[in-house]
Image: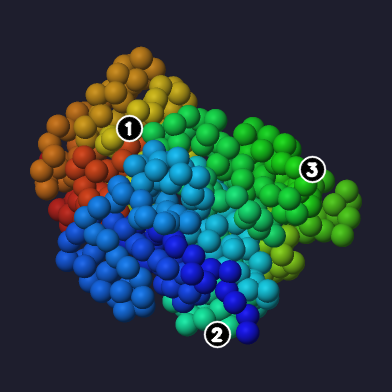
């Protein structure tokens, strides 16, 4: 009889989110003594607690600060900061703290599906979904998991964890894994078959405490034995790959013509000079630029990164193209909403920090820019300076709009700016109406807020839906320029 290494181990699962509940189920199925804790104590949490208690998990609601007595391991949800009282108490007591990603890696069965992992400041979800489409097009049973939706523990352990390790099924032969900096922070032994860092820009510094700590978390994805696929156009991504010790090989991707060892763009084609039989003299045509949807330079980079991981796994060129053609973009990411009076309206509500907004603004010209929200302490001067020449006008909304206005005054003083102070449910209609008044035929009205949405909306999808609804009402009303 095989004894599970988890049998009898006292584990505290911090947080009853999707990943936390998946971790608790999997651990309980392997004989661990699991206590799940959450500071919340509402109807939803009580229903979740009842489901877990049926599986032998002890649940403590209303107290997310106290470390359960006798805890030998903490599995934390990614949103919990390292200085949270429970985690600080565990660290002080010498108790190991890991995340659901690290737990999934340790729970993998012997015949585990390889992981192809993606991290970066922007583009992770798009790239991981592109990758899953490429893998599926090549005939593999693949799934996009991690920060993108399905908890990795569920994918690794088969459904909801299985009643025992022996009953674990392997329904997939490869996993496309999206990893946030939070998830990587709590990982120590993770070693994907191939991995990429799409790009690096300041983000989540309030969680990590510094830019160095944020970059250090991202760097963990390039582990010994991993094929490191890096962004040759991003200095930090390239440096992380160069410094990574023990990687199997390095391959770059670029929006330029690729050199040997890189994937890139030649005229209207995406080509591979990294994973061919002779990269020095041979290139493989992967797809056309028109196969990348929605088209924008940063999305071409996402496609090349996904292609690099797919090619590292052995996916043939024709499956890369088929995968890109079958890919359905998620909403609120450079999403074309409508053309009204010759003006295109584009929803990129997901652009919640300067790096993402810069990529979106670089895709269009001329632009009436809708911006504002919670800037989370991030500086917007470089962003405004870089896009000033593309702007027809700007409409500002949200709590930190004055900071964007100040940057515009410094770097784009001649660009018309409309300040919308409203925060009621009709605010977005006024924003869109003002933008339509600034736009001319051939322009793009672009919602790329550069800030988080929580000052006015429940989340960035809610903000995007408000923009879509306002544009549709504008279209139904007819030409806004007519008088």
Q: Secondary structure at mark 2?
A: helix
Q: In this orientation, which residue lies closer to the viewer: 180 or 398? A: 180
Q: Is residue 236 visible?
A: yes
Total number of numbered labels?
A: 3
Q: In this orientation, which residue lies closer to the viewer: 77 or 236? A: 77
Q: Do the numbered discs 2 and 1 sit on residues whose CB atoms are within 8 Å?
A: no
How far from the left and from the top, in percent, is residue 405? 28, 23
**How packed is label 1: few (under 14 Cα within 10 Å), some, or many (20 or more)?**
many
From this view, report whether residue 22 is shown above or below residue 68: below
Q: Secondary structure at mark 3?
A: loop
How far from the left and from the top, in percent, is residue 396? 24, 32
**Which part of the image, by quadrant, shows the N terminus?**
bottom right
Q: Secondary structure at mark 1?
A: loop
How far from the left and from the top, in percent, is residue 160? 44, 76
From this view, report whether residue 20 is shown above or below residue 470: below
Q: Is residue 388 visible?
A: no
Q: Which residue is mark 3?
A: 259
C-alpha distance separating marks 3 and 2: 47 Å
Q: Which residue is mark 2?
A: 167
Q: Could you tell which of marks 3 and 2 lies nearer the N-terminus?
A: 2
**How packed is label 3: few (under 14 Cα within 10 Å), some, or many (20 or more)?**
some
Q: Residue at x 72, y 41 (%)?
A: 244
| Mark seen at residue 375 | 1
Residue 43 horizontal side relative to residue 20, left or right: left
């Amino acid at each position: 009889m095989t004894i599970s290494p988890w049998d009898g181990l006292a584990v505290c699962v911090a947080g009853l989110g999707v990943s936390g509940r998946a971790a608790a189920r999997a651990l309980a199925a392997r004989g661990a003594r699991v206590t799940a804790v959450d500071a919340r104590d509402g109807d939803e949490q009580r229903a979740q607690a009842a489901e877990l208690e049926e599986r032998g998990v002890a649940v403590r609601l209303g107290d997310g600060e106290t470390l359960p007595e006798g805890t030998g391991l903490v599995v934390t949800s990614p949103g919990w900061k390292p200085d949270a009282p429970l985690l600080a108490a565990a660290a002080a007591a010498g108790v190991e703290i890991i995340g659901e990603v690290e737990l999934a890696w340790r729970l993998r069965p012997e015949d585990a599906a390889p992981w192809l992992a993606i991290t970066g400041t922007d583009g992770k979800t798009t790239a991981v979904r592109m990758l899953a489409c490429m893998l599926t097009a090549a005939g593999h049973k693949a799934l996009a998991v991690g920060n993108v939706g399905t908890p990795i523990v569920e994918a690794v352990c088969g459904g909801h964890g299985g009643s025992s390790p022996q009953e674990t099924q392997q329904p997939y032969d490869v996993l496309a894994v999206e990893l946030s900096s939070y998830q990587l922070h709590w990982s120590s032994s993770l070693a994907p078959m191939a991995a990429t860092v799409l790009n690096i820009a300041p983000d989540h510094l309030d969680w990590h405490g510094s830019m160095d700590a944020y970059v250090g978390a991202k760097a963990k994805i390039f582990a010994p034995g991993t094929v490191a696929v890096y962004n040759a156009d991003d200095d930090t991504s390239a440096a992380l790959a160069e410094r990574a010790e023990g990687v199997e090989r390095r391959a770059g991707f670029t929006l330029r013509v690729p050199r040997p060892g890189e994937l890139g763009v030649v005229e209207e084609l995406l080509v591979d000079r990294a994973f061919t039989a002779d990269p020095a003299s041979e290139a493989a045509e992967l797809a056309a630029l028109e196969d990348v949807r929605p088209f924008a330079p940063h999305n071409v980079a996402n496609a090349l990164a996904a292609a690099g991981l797919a090619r590292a796994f052995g996916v043939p060129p024709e499956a890369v193209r088929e995968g890109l053609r079958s890919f359905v973009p998620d909403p609120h990411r450079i999403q074309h909403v409508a053309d009204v009076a010759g003006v295109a309206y584009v929803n990129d509500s997901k652009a919640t920090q300067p790096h993402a907004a810069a990529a979106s603004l670089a895709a269009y010209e001329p632009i009436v820019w809708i911006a504002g929200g919670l800037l989370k302490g991030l500086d917007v001067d470089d962003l405004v300076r870089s896009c000033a020449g593309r702007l027809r006008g700007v409409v500002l909304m949200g709590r930190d709009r004055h900071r964007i206005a100040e940057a515009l005054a410094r770097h784009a003083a001649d660009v018309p700016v409309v300040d919308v102070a409203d925060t009621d449910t009709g605010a977005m209609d006024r924003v869109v109406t003002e933008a339509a008044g600034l736009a001319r035929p051939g322009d793009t009205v672009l919602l790329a807020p550069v800030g988080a949405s929580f000052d006015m909306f429940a989340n960035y999808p809610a903000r995007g839906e408000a923009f879509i609804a306002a544009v549709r009402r504008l279209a139904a009303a007819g030409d806004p320029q007519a008088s």
